[in-house]
Image: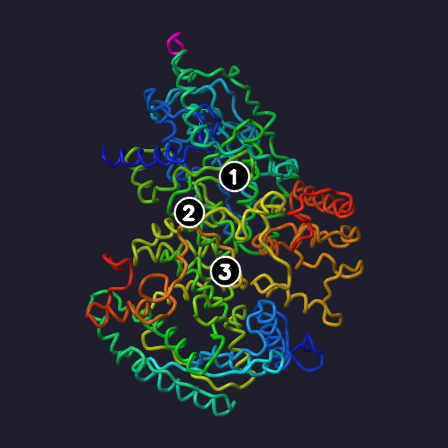
Amino acid sequence: DCFKAFYVHKFRAMLGKNRLIFPGEKVLLAWSGGPSSSSMVWQVLEGLSQDSAKRLRFVPGVIFVDGITSSWVFPVALRSAIRENPLPKGRWPTPHNSARKHCRGFPQGEVAPCPALPGSVSPDSFCLRFSEGAAFGKSLEERSKTLAEVKPILQATGLPWHVVALEEVFSLPPSVLRCSAQEPAGSEGAYKAAVDSFLQQQHVLGAGGGPGPTQGKEQPPQPRLDPQSLARPPAAAQTEALSQLFCSVRTLTAKEELLQTLRTHLILHMARAHGYSKVMTGDSCTRLAIKLMTNLALGRGAFLAWDTGFSDERHGDVVVVRPMRDHTLKEVAFYNRLFSVPSVFTPAVDTKAPEKASIHRLMEAFILRLQTQFPSTVSTVYRTSEKLVKAPRDGPAASDSSPCCLLCMCALDVDAADSATAFGAQTSSRLSQMQSPTPLTETRTPLGPCCSPGVGRVQGCGQGACRREDPQACIEEQLCYSCRVNMKDLPSLDLLPPYMLAEAQLRTQRAWVLQEIQDCLIEDSDDEAGQS
Amino acid sequence: MPAPPCASCHASRAALRRPRSGQALCGACFCAAFEAEVLHTVLAGRLLPPGAVVAVGASGGKDSTVLAHVLRALTPRLGISLQLVAVDEGIGGYRDAALAAVRRQAARWELPLTVVAYEDLFGGWTMDAVARSTAGSGRSRSCCTFCGVLRRRALEEGARRVGATHIVTGHNADDMAETVLMNFLRGDAGRLARGGGLGSPGEGGALPRCRPLQFASQKEVVLYAHFRRLDYFSEECVYAPEAFRGHARDLLKRLEAARPSAVLDLVHSAERLALAPAARPPRPGACSRCGALASRALCQACALLDGLNRGRPRLAIGKGRRGW
């Protein structure tokens, strides 16, 4: 009891302290099937069902992110893993239809509350779920097995859900990669005012005898969740393209990063499509500490605050929130065990991978090992991460006009090539390697390698000729340091989903056009585009 | 099968492959490239202006040997003059052998050498004595904490004695990467905020310090020493296995195996860390006892020595009451 109270208190305190989620807001819960995100969903459901004073006031939806299986890499181990996996609930009988039909989602009428889970039926919530099994040649029957395990849990939450296959990345629009206009962050006063007005509304409606679960809000009647339109069975061509993409990546580290990126983009797209303004992910304290150290090693030191902080606003209109940030994995495991929280084990891309296979694995093993010797390691790293801020190092001046990375959408963190930094050291050696006969000049000669990887600014790639000569380098220029390093493991950037390539093309073109009309533009005097 | 030709001079056979880029180079070209990169670091960061008297912290190990050698080769380009400063911490069986190596180098290169000993500077405390004094506390000895702080004081003192204007040390990219990992694991936000740049510019009367080898990985330093046939002392300190840095070093080795560019990626991350203003160390003032640069009333060296002298060696380590 005390443990439960403590656990729930941590969750609510994390949400309450940060005051980011306004009442009545639509929030998407990203569920991967693993223990911490299952716990998060459970907490939300419980929170929705409490009496009105303490009830959670937002409108949740659930998105299930199916893990990747790496059947290409570890075929034998994984198949046995799936078979050995003990299911929390009984298996659903696999329908005779082919697995494709599974992906199409399920009729929305059945939102029957399951006795195992608390929670009133909240008609305005959505579930979304991914099925990435195709990425690695997972056979259709394995995919359907996982889907079958996941489906009852999702249905039992009482929240509408979607099934989206990872292949959908091939039909994403390039607008996913654009940061939408940011809403101004609500100040203290705004939050309080919103809560007050919400309570007032509820009062009024409650007096009129309105039903509880509607939460006193005007909502359009049950938005049709067209599973058909969202979750078309993935075309075989798309599946093939996805497999090709992932197989061509040379290292496991880059694979994981790529998967993470694609997943984020998909979640973002679905959130935007259905009007969600927040996404909640179930990263626990331990996972975040590992993620922080991993990102350090990947070169993302500039973005640690976004990657591991409570809120991540780099996408603009959709904010990613991490309410399980304070809970260690041990606590989550105990809680799940004590209160039988349902979860699904889906093997990830690095399940059963040897320790040296990727940076992620290495760091995880290291931190957990160090934790046994120095029990305060994880909490120390977590506390240090709280001291990180989101300002770029050279002040906030460049925030509006600075270009963002194509993939991770953070402000670019690379300088000019010949500066005395780690990046400068790498590029200068590479350049001297590439051009031994001619000395390196700063002037942009049309024949020279104008898209030299050293020039970090998009404006530098101003030559029209470069667009046709070296698309690879043009894309590289638009990436931050760590995305560049990841892309090095990808031999050919053409296998990337078309939306990325389209957006890269668009940005290059825009920069070129900007270059052309530079003289005619009137700008603020303190923000010169050519400033280095 | 015969080795491929050198990628840069195309004349002689390649003798090595650069770990960072995989390029095949012959010995002479590699050394030239290495020196060029160090020069680039110094010039681009404007670390050593012409006319500077540079005190090289020489320990006899590979990093400081390579550093002294490269800087000596670059003195005509940079217009600086070099002085070797060696610190004797009083670690028996280790430091004396290292000092012998330094003396040989100084003789061979004809550079003036100054040796500063802990015993003289710090009231008779040698590292062995410190180790004995902290040994009884039941936890790890944290000799390295003492040694690091005191050595920097000693280096500063030695540099002042020879009238130097800058101090250079031989920290390489691996050291920087290990430092940032270690600081994160220990939660040392103050050091995180301070480190990661190109060395300190020297505020409040302290001499400016820099690390010209900062972007050279350890492997390359060793390769350079091999090809130039430099004579250095290559054993590790007696107290090294107890240090926390060992964990970070171990991790770094594995990371490097998984991804060769991990070292420079870490250095890049360290440069770009953004810490909250509250976590940054306060503007440094002067120590009330010795007048050196300090961010609190007493500089760390004085605080540590105080603790030692009072018989409470862990006085200045950790957060005070709880220690570590």
- The image quadrant that residue B299 belongs to is bottom left
Mark 3 packing: few (<14 Cα in 10 Å), some, or many (20+)?
Answer: many
Letter of the chain that mark 3 sits on in the rendering: B
Q: Earlier in the sequence, mark 1 or mark 2?
A: 2
What residue does disc 3 label?
A: B266
Q: Is residue B220 magenta?
A: no
Q: Identify the secondary structure beneath mark 1.
A: loop
- In which quadrant of the rendered view does residue B129 lie? bottom left
Which disc number belongs to residue B123? none
Q: Which mark is residue A313?
A: 1
User: Is A98 displayed left or right of A311 in the figure?
Assistant: right
Does residue A170 lie above or below B27 as drawn? above
Left or right placement of residue A114 versus residue B208 in this view:
left
Q: CA distance from mark 2 to mark 3?
A: 18 Å
Residue drawn at x 48%, y 34% as measured from the top left: A279
Q: Chain of mark 2?
A: A
Q: Position of residue A146 (x, y in %)?
A: 47, 36
